[in-house]
Image (cartoon, helix red, strand yellow):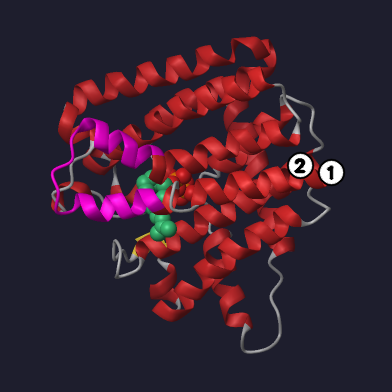
Amino acid sequence: MTTLKKALSDNAKAVSGVLDDLLPLGNGPESRVVEAMRYTTLAGGKRIRPFMVTASADLFNVDPAHSLRVAAAIEMVHSYSLIHDDLPAMDNDDLRRGKPTCHIKFDEATAILAGDALLTKAFEVLADDETHGDPTVRMELVSALSKASGAAGMVGGQMLDLFAEDHDLKMPEITRLQRMKTGALIAVSCEAGAILGKASENARHVLHAYAHDVGLAFQIADDLLDVEGDEKALGKKTGKDAAAGKATFVSLLGVERAREQASLLAEQAASHLEIFAEKGKLLKELAQFVVNRSA
Ligand code: GRG
């Protein structure tokens, strides 16, 4: 196993442990919603965003007890977005990570509530003094994650994605859509490490530039997998963008140019991290991993 794969796997285990602790199953009939929250958050996934949080925080020697809680909070927001995205009113998907989606396993109303509760739980975790002793750091984390996940970020991007179903978007509009829908949560994952580490303006700027390029590279790779990926390995349906007639990086650039663009972005992302020297190695490798992944 490469160093990065081992680091990703160790981190995924640690984050799952924290999620498990943060989402204890209750007793009453209302605990069905927690069951649904646990079903999705503990169902695996690559845990790329949580890794970005802890790897960014490691650049500034942050205590992992703090960064893992922030990583878990961001994974909760990611899980909520997947649950809601899979609903019949959105993408109407039955399969996610090789398992029935939350609304198929439970029911639509429970899935909506599980998403809502994961989103709110994330902010409860960030606001807790176990996450960081300094209230200014906690406030900055809450502010950054709310901006990234709301109407100016992920939710706004999802709105644009629905708009794209019956509008012919061009490259600048697709880029903006993806920066909001997928890129914002990736960017805040790196930003969170810098906030926890009370990083300098320059270090924050550098991490932001890295996250921007990785976010776009991630989305291009996602579009390529939708065209060429293996449904079994991905654990979800492919060919959905073409079936919905949606313009994507791949439909606009073609497979070859899209692949080249993703590689260039990964290289560019890594080059931003030179100031961190050897300490930036895992994040640099992550940029390549995001592009070369098969799931
Ligand atoms: C419904 C509020 C709301 C937002 C939905 C991000 C998003 C917006 C929907 C997710 C749907 C999707 C497939 C987006 C493309 C990129 C993406 C986020 C893929 C899934 O992320 P991975 O590959 O998933 O990191 P794992 O399973 O590894 O966690």
Q: Is residue 242 above or below residue 279?
A: below
Residue 196 picture quarter: top right
Q: Quadrant of the C terminus?
A: top left
Residue 190 picture quarter: top right
Ligand 1 within 8 A of label 1's CB?
no
Q: Amino acid at mark 1?
A: Asp
Residue that carries the numbered disc 1 in the rendered image: 134
Circles 2, 1 touching at the beta carbon (< 8 Å): yes
In space, the residues marked 2 and 1 are separated at their CA atoms by: 5 Å
What residue is shown at x 72% (from left), y 25% (from top)? 199
Q: Quadrant of the N terminus?
A: top right
Question: Is residue 238 in view?
Answer: yes
Label 2: element kind: helix
Q: Position of residue 69 (x, y in %)?
A: 72, 49
What residue is shown at x 71% (from left), y 85% (from top)? 27
Question: Is residue 293 in view?
Answer: no
Report the magenta residues as a range.
Answer: 156-179
Residue that carries the numbered disc 2 in the rendered image: 137
Please state if 79 lies on the left or on the right of 191 as rendered. Answer: left
Q: Position of residue 91 (x, y in %)?
A: 29, 61
Q: Residue furthest bottom?
A: 29
What residue is shown at x 57% (from left), y 32% (from top)? 5
Please state if 201 lies on the left or on the right of 260 as rendered. Answer: right
Residue 9 picture quarter: top right
Q: Amino acid at mark 2?
A: Val
Q: Position of residue 183 (x, y in %)?
A: 44, 38
